[in-house]
Amino acid sequence: MHVGLLLTKKTKECIGWCGLKYFKESLNNHSHFYELGYRFKQKHWGKGFATESSNAILKYGFKKLHIKSIYAITHHENVNSMHVLRKLGFKFIETFDYEGDPTSWFELTKSDWENSI
């Protein structure tokens, strides 16, 4: 797992984390893949931290780890997270059932990422 905690410059408060997790086990009929994930304290939502930190993580994944595709999942009703993923260049693939909840599956290939920068 490649994860970074995010701190504010001024107060050094931990506002959340962002990173890549490698899945060996199967999820939505996929295995052996990297997933982008992030979590932030609610008071820091909507401030661009997810986009900014995810951009850095994607660059690390594609340039340093030489990953070919990175996936992301989010609850189907989490429109803010889906907006962030689309802004990053992820493409919606499908909705699947994850632990009883409708979940959106996204993918970003290295070539699509390279064409967007």
Image: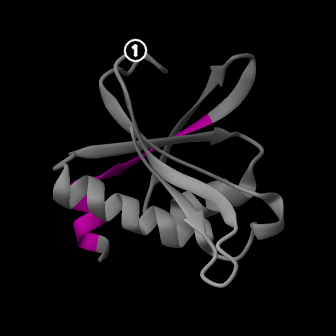
Instruction: Tell me: 36 left or right of 22.
Output: right
Q: Within the magenta stretch, is there residue 114?
A: yes
x 52%, y 54%: residue = 18
**Farthest front residue?**
11
Task: Determine the residue positioned at 60% across, 81% down.
Answer: 9
Direction bottom: furthest residue:
10
Q: Residue at x 71, y 28 (%)?
A: 102
Kind of residue at badge 1: Glu
Residue displayed at 28% across by 44% down: 69
Residue numbers of the magenta segment:
104-115
**Does residue 89 sit above or below 97 in this rendering?**
below
Query: Could you tell me residue 90's position as x and y percent?
Result: 45, 55
Q: Position of residue 109 (x, y in %)?
A: 28, 51
Q: Could one spot residue 88 in this view of the protein?
A: no
Viewer-side residue, 84 vs 38: 38
- Residue 7 at least partly seen: yes
- Location of residue 59 with respect to 62 vertically, above or below: below
**Tag 1 residue:** 25
In this view, 11 is above or below 43 = below
Specify whether residue 88 is painted magenta.
Answer: no
Left or right placement of residue 15 versus residue 7 in this view: right
Quadrant where the C terminus is found in the figure:
bottom left
Left or right: residue 64 compared with residue 26: left
Asked which secondary structure carries label 1, the reply is loop
Relative side of 17 to 113, left or right: right
Q: Nearer the viewer, residue 71 or 41?
A: 41
